[in-house]
Amino acid sequence: MKIICIGRNYSNHIKEMKSETPGEPVFFMKPDTALLTDGKPFYHPDFSNEIHHEAELVLKICKTGKHIDIEFANTYFDEIGIGIDFTARDLQAACKASGHPWEKAKSFDNSAPIGNFLQKNNFKNISDINFRLDINGKTIQKGNTSDLLFPFDKIISYVSGFVTLKKGDLIFTGTPEGVGPVKPGDKLEAFIEEKKMLAFEVK
Ligand code: MG
């Protein structure tokens, strides 16, 4: 399986990063070795002094598709969860400055913790889903899918024009504002609406 991540998909996050608003979805990938599951702890790696949390809703792809028409895109995912797109911000800044790819800042082991998933049909309106990240009991990031620059259907249609999607693939759909560093001892809890979907500790 593969993990596809969308960057710059919430305008207030684009502002906090002083990035430009993209005209089409920006995506990158993480390997399956980036997955961190079952509430296992995240061990802060030594190669970075600035590992940022990015809380994101995650789509689970349910069938193979390429060149998916936007009209049918919603039939290609059946579950929605929440995950963290951990980012070595210091390494990413250096990669950006030298015009190099970001992979080492984004794709390192355990950089994609995920929690439980909910069936898509549990949601009345997928264009109005609240989600949040609490750290040590305090809400640090809050998002709502009505603020997505590129909604789920557009993401699936666009990405599948370049990369074949397969059952079990995950799409991280972008982070809202409020990204920041984590440190050993931090307890992260991510919620969809009021349901706790993911909980783990940084060590
Ligand atoms: Mg992200």
Image (tube, rainbow, N blue to C red):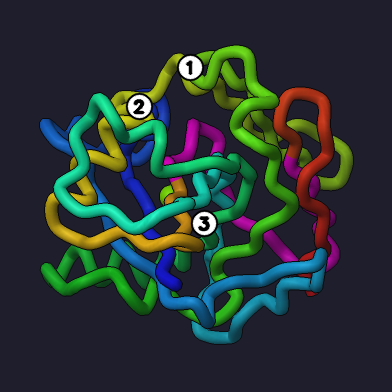
Quadrant in which the C terminus appears: bottom right
- Secondary structure beneath dot 2 equals loop
Of the residues shown, which amino acid type is indicated by label 2? Answer: Pro
Residue picked out by circle 2: 151
SS under mark 1: loop
The residue carrying pointer 3 sits among few (fewer than 14), some (14 to 19) or many (20 or more) residues within 10 Å by Cα, namely many
Image location (x, y in percent) of residue 90: 41, 67
**Span of residues in magenta:** 173-190
* Residue 20 circle label: none
- Mark 3–mark 2 Cα distance, whole angstroms, equals 18 Å
| SS state under label 3 | loop
Q: Which residue is mark 1?
A: 127
**Which percent across, then down, holds residue 164?**
24, 61
* Marker disc for residue 85: 3
Residue at image location 53% in from the left, 75% down from the top: 34
- Mark 3 CB in 8 Å range of ligand 1? yes
In which image quadrant can residue 96 be found? bottom left
